């Protein structure tokens, strides 16, 4: 049974995917919206990315491949077909309506005033196709005082207080290294689309899904606001430590760094045994999270001294054997080489023109019966014009040539 489950999760068994038969039109750009669409595509939806004839806003963002093309959308555009369409032109809007009539989900990241102008506002979509689900991805949402502002990941992190609690106590506010708010918003958008599809099975009608970066960032702030309101304590950056647990930090070994998290009494007892400090196990100064955190400086120093005498591998082996949470701090090459990450298929290699195989992040969601996969590279500009406009909408070669000549596609 375990073997079959593993094979299913790895995609070794041929199975249909959850969203087979669902068509998604992706008008979004940058990360959050495209990642939302990527997730739906990985779970089986037919995702059609729609760009202007000259290409989308994110096509020329680095890093840059040797041939000069921007690599930025290589991950976020996987599992999608790519078409071009000038939605500002009358003919382009006519074609857009034809696509909308044959689709299930629309993902967009336009400002509210822009999407109404091109007919992607929710009332306009409902008039064309009452079953359509609209996922609007933005910086500040579809209503509220800031709704007409543009926004990016770092702006949301700053306004949610996330940067204020990141970094070191003596340093300035600091942004997270990855665009976690973009990714989180994409996840919320995909979840919203799935829930709306589920509801549509009951009612036959679509609905609007509103996700934004600032909401996501605020929702990621744990108990920080309660801590301030109830206790009067404003949390600051703690470096690599975790609040209210100790010893928990990044520690330097002979050949690198490790993260150690001693967050329960059981872990504390085991940790003391491993480092040869069993006399501290039942000491009243260290026998609960509450008092350990009050003595974190001493406990982190204790851990730091022990780790400094060993290699990363020795620390990981000793603590893992005892059941204490620990992990190496990897460089990017080490991530790509890790056997567990590879076994979980969290690095996928997709073939890109003129470059060859490119390693990209895999799909974190594993389903046993209907597994998804990130298994198709992102499209070139207009790569699927013939397939979508010809096969789906019925335009012949002469019509397509005329549309291209007129700059509509």
Image (tube, rainbow, N blue to C red):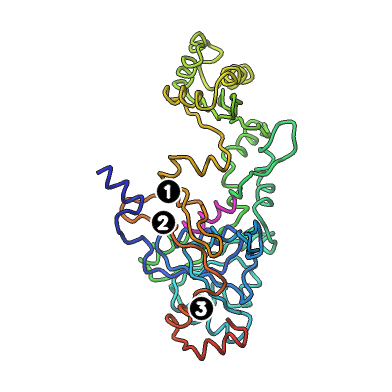
| Mark 3 → mark 2, Cα distance in angstroms | 24 Å
Q: Is the C-beta separation of discs 2 and 1 under 8 Å? A: yes
Tell me where residue 8 appears, x and y as whole percent. 31, 51
Q: Main secondary structure of the magenta part?
A: helix
Please name whichever residue, 216 or 199, is drawn nearer the observer in this view of the structure.
Answer: 216
Image quarter in which the N terminus is found: top left
Classify residue 333 as left or right of residue 388. Answer: right
Does 155 sit above or below residue 335? below
Q: Earlier in the sequence, mark 3 or mark 2?
A: 2
Residue shown at 49%/60% (left/top)? 351
Q: Residue furthest top?
A: 279
The mark nearer the N terminus, 2 or 1, is 1
Earlier residue among tags 3 and 1: 1
Q: Magenta includes 374?
A: no
| Circle on res. 373 | 2
Separation (CA) of disc 3 from disc 1: 31 Å
Whether residue 52 can be seen here: yes
Q: Residue at x 72, y 40 (%)?
A: 173
Crowding near pointer 3: few (<14 within 10 Å), some, many (20+)? some
Q: Is residue 394 left or right of residue 135?
A: left
Q: Residue at x 59, y 29 (%)?
A: 256
Report how far apart the C-alphas of labels 2 and 1 lie in the structure. 9 Å
Q: Secondary structure at mark 1?
A: loop
- Secondary structure state at the residue bearing disc 3: helix
Q: Position of residue 314 (x, y in %)?
A: 50, 23
Outermost residue, left direction?
A: 1
* Image location of residue 210, percent across then percent down: 55, 61
| Label ID, residue 345 | 1
User: Which numbered marker is on residue 385?
Assistant: 3
């Amino acid at each position: 049974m375990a073997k079959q489950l593993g094979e299913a999760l790895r995609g070794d068994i041929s199975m249909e995917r959850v969203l087979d038969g669902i068509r998604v039109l992706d008008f979004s750009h940058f990360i959050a919206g495209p990642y939302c669409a990527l997730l739906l595509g990985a779970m089986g939806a037919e995702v059609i990315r729609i760009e202007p004839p000259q290409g989308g806003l994110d096509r020329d963002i680095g890093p840059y491949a040797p041939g000069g093309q921007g690599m930025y959308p290589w991950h976020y555009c996987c599992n999608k077909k790519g078409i071009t369409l000038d939605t500002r032109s009358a003919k382009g809007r006519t074609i857009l309506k034809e696509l909308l009539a044959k689709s299930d989900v629309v993902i967009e990241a336009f400002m509210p005033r822009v999407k109404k102008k091109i007919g992607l506002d929710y009332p306009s979509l409902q008039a064309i196709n009452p079953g359509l689900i609209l996922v609007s991805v933005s910086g500040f949402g579809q209503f509220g005082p800031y709704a007409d502002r543009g926004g990016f990941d770092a702006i949301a992190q700053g306004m949610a207080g996330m940067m204020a609690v990141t970094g070191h106590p003596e340093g300035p506010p600091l942004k997270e290294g990855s665009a976690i708010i973009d990714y989180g918003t994409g996840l919320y958008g995909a979840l919203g689309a799935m829930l709306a599809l589920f509801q549509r099975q009951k009612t036959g009608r679509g609905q609007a899904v509103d996700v934004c970066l600032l909401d996501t960032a605020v929702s990621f702030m744990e108990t920080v606001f309660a801590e301030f309101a109830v206790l009067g304590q404003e949390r600051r950056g703690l470096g690599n430590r975790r609040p209210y647990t100790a010893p928990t930090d990044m520690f330097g070994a002979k050949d690198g760094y490790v993260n150690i998290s001693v967050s329960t009494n059981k872990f504390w007892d085991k940790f003391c045994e491993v480092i040869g400090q069993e006399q501290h196990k039942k000491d009243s100064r260290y026998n609960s999270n509450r008092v350990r955190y009050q003595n974190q400086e001493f406990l982190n120093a204790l851990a730091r001294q022990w780790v400094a005498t060993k290699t990363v591998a020795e620390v990981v082996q000793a603590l893992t054997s005892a059941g204490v949470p620990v992990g190496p701090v990897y460089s990017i090459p080490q991530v790509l080489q890790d056997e567990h990450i590879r076994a979980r298929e969290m690095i996928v290699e997709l073939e890109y023109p003129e470059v060859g195989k490119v390693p990209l992040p895999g799909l974190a969601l594993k389903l046993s019966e209907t597994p998804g996969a990130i298994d198709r590279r992102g499209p070139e500009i207009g790569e699927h014009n013939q397939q979508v406009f010809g096969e789906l909408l019925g335009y012949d070669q002469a019509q397509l040539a005329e549309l291209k000549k007129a700059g509509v596609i």
